[in-house]
Amino acid sequence: MANAKKSKHSSRGPASRQAASKQAARDRVAAMRAQAKRAERRRNLMMIGAIAAVVVIIGGGVAWYAASRGGTSSTSAEVVPAAPSGTPESQPAAHVVPNTSGISGVVAYNTAGWPAASKNGPANQALGHNHVPGPVTYSVTPPVGGNHNATWLNCGVYTKPVPNEYAVHNLEHGAIWITYQPSLPQSEVSQLKSFVERQSVLSPAGGTTGSRYMDLTPYPGLPSPIVVSSWGFQLRLSSPTDSRLQQFVDKFRASQQYTPEYGGECTGGTGTPAAT
C-alpha cells in the first residue's frame, strides 16, 4: 500500500513542477511587460516636458521680439472713421503757383497768408483753413489743403481709404500723405509701408507724444500709381523707389516753413491706424 501511494505521489511531481515552471515564465513575461510600459511612460513624459519647454522658449522669444519692436512700430485693430455728415460744400478751384521747392515734378498751390493765424489770401485762390462739419468735394485729387473737419486723423498706415476731411487736417499740422492706387502691387505697397516706418519720430511742439507725421492710405481714382501730398504741394510718382519721395518728405514734413499750424498734433484725433 505504501508503495502504491509513493508511486502516485511520484507521478504528480513532474506535472506540478511543469505547471510551476510555466507560471514562473508567465510571471516573468508579465514583469517584463510592466517594466516596458513603465519605461514607455517615462519616455512619453520626458517628450512632453521637452515639447513644453520648447513652446515656452519660442513663446518667450516671440514676446521679446514684439516688445523690442514696440519702439519703432505698433499694430492694432484698424478703425477708419466714418465720413462726416452735415451740409456738403465744394472747394473752389485751387490756384497753381510756380514750384519753388527745388524738387522736380512738384505742383505748388496758392497758400498765401499762412502760417499766420491760419488765414489765407484772395478767395478762390489760396487754400482755405475753415473747419466745416460736412463733406467737402475737393478740386484736387487727392486734396492738398482747404476747408476740413475740426478733428484730425491719427497719423499712421491705413489699409482702407480714409475720409478726406480728416486727412486734410493732418496736412495742416505738417503731415505727409502718401496715397496709392488700390491696384498697386502688394510688393510696392509693402515698400511704401517700409518707407514710412523708416522715417524718424518727431515732436515739433516739444511734447512727449511724438509721431512720424506720415499717413499711408489707398485712394481710388488717383491720377498716377502713387501721389504724395503736403499742405499746398503735391508730387506724382510711378514707383515707391523714386528718390524724390524722400526729398519731398524731408522738405515738407512738419516743416516750420511750410506747415500752416506748426506744432499741431498728429495723435489724439480720430481713427486707429493699422500701424503707427
Image (tube, rainbow, N blue to C red):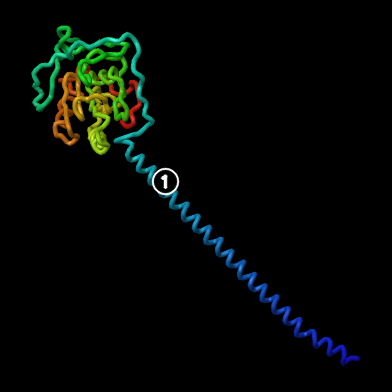
Query: Residue 108, image x and y in percent?
Result: 13, 19
- Dividing the picture into quarters, in which one does residue 198 lie? top left
Numbered disc 1: secondary structure: helix
Q: Residue at x 17, y 14 (%)?
A: 94
Q: Residue at x 9, y 27 (%)?
A: 104
Q: Amino acid at mark 1?
A: Gly
Query: Residue furthest toward the bottom?
Result: 3
Query: Residue 276, image x and y in percent?
Result: 31, 31
Q: Residue at x 28, y 17 (%)?
A: 165
Give the class, few, some or many, for how many residues have Cα within 10 Å of label 1's Cα (few <14, many ≥20): few
- Dividing the picture into quarters, in which one does residue 187 lie? top left
Image vertical order of residue 212 relative to residue 130, above or below:
below
Residue 202, visible in the rendered structure: no
Image vertical order of residue 249 relative to residue 119, above or below:
below
The residue to which callout 1 is attached is 59
Total labels: the figure holds 1
Image vertical order of residue 261 relative to residue 240, above or below:
above
Query: Residue furthest toward the right?
Result: 1
Q: Which sits in the foreground, 31 or 64?
A: 31
Q: Which sits in the foreground, 65 or 247?
A: 247
Query: Residue 139, image x and y in percent?
Result: 20, 15
Q: Which sits in the foreground, 186 or 253?
A: 186
Dividing the image into 4 quarters, which one contains the N terminus? bottom right
Left or right: where 47 falls relative to 116: right
Residue 151, visible in the rendered structure: yes
Query: Residue 163, image x and y in percent?
Result: 30, 20
Left or right: where 243 falls relative to 86: left
